[in-house]
Image (cartoon, rainbow, N blue to C red):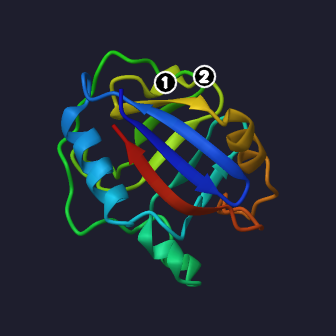
Amino acid sequence: MARATLETSFGNIIFELSPNIAPETVRNFTKLAKSNFYDGTLFHRVIPGFMIQGGDPNTKTPNKSKWGMGGPGYTIKAEFNSRSHLRGIVSMARANDPNSAGSQFFIVTTDSTFLDKQYTVFAEVVSGMDVADKIVNLPRDKNDCPNQEAKILRVTVSE
């Protein structure tokens, strides 16, 4: 089973990828990770009792007004599946259009089953939920942006 290791400024988070339920999403995430796309990006949205979101290349710049709007320059088709959004699930973030995901993803820190079959689940955290918990509880501004940088230093995928 392929795994992704996110080295963050708070410690490592390891996902087990799920190509059996979201093959194109896993392929896209792996491609982006292997091209260093995620390296140096931030978890730009943290909501205690819900999730942490990252994967936006715009977070490499200090212009917070653009954070949450960036992607790889293309979108991928949704792959909704039966996996429930329970604590530790990794899912693709998107705009209103279900087929608008690109690079942004979120890690569920508290069961959020209201998201089921509306967002593409593509991985599950197998190690490092304590790190996600530290990040989700950082003090934040009115836009849910952490006041302290929670940086993704490097993402590696091992098959």
Q: Residue 85 carries which label?
A: 1
Q: Mark 2 points at which residue?
A: 111
**Taking 9 as reference, is 135 above or below it?**
above
Rendering coords of residue 118 (x, y %): 34, 31
Q: Residue at x 72, y 43 (%)?
A: 131
- Of the numbered discs 1 and 2, the one sitting upstream in the chain is 1
Residue 151 picture quarter: bottom right
Residue 21 in the figure: left or right of residue 59: left
Is 89 positioned to the left or the right of 132 in the image?
Answer: left
Q: Is residue 132 left or right of residue 64?
A: right
Report the residue that reaches farthest toward the bottom.
Answer: 62
Residue visible at 59% across and 54% down in the picture: 7
Q: How crowded is mark 1: few (under 14 residues within 10 Å), some or many (20 or more)?
A: many
Q: Where is residue 139 in the image (x, y as percent from the top left)?
A: 82, 57
Quadrant of residue 2 in the image?
A: top left
| Classed neighbour count for the residue bearing mark 2: other residues with Cα under 10 Å, few (<14), some (14–19), many (≥20) | some
Q: Could you say which is closer to the camera, residue 45 or residue 97?
A: 45
User: Which quadrant of the rendered structure holds the C terminus?
Assistant: top left
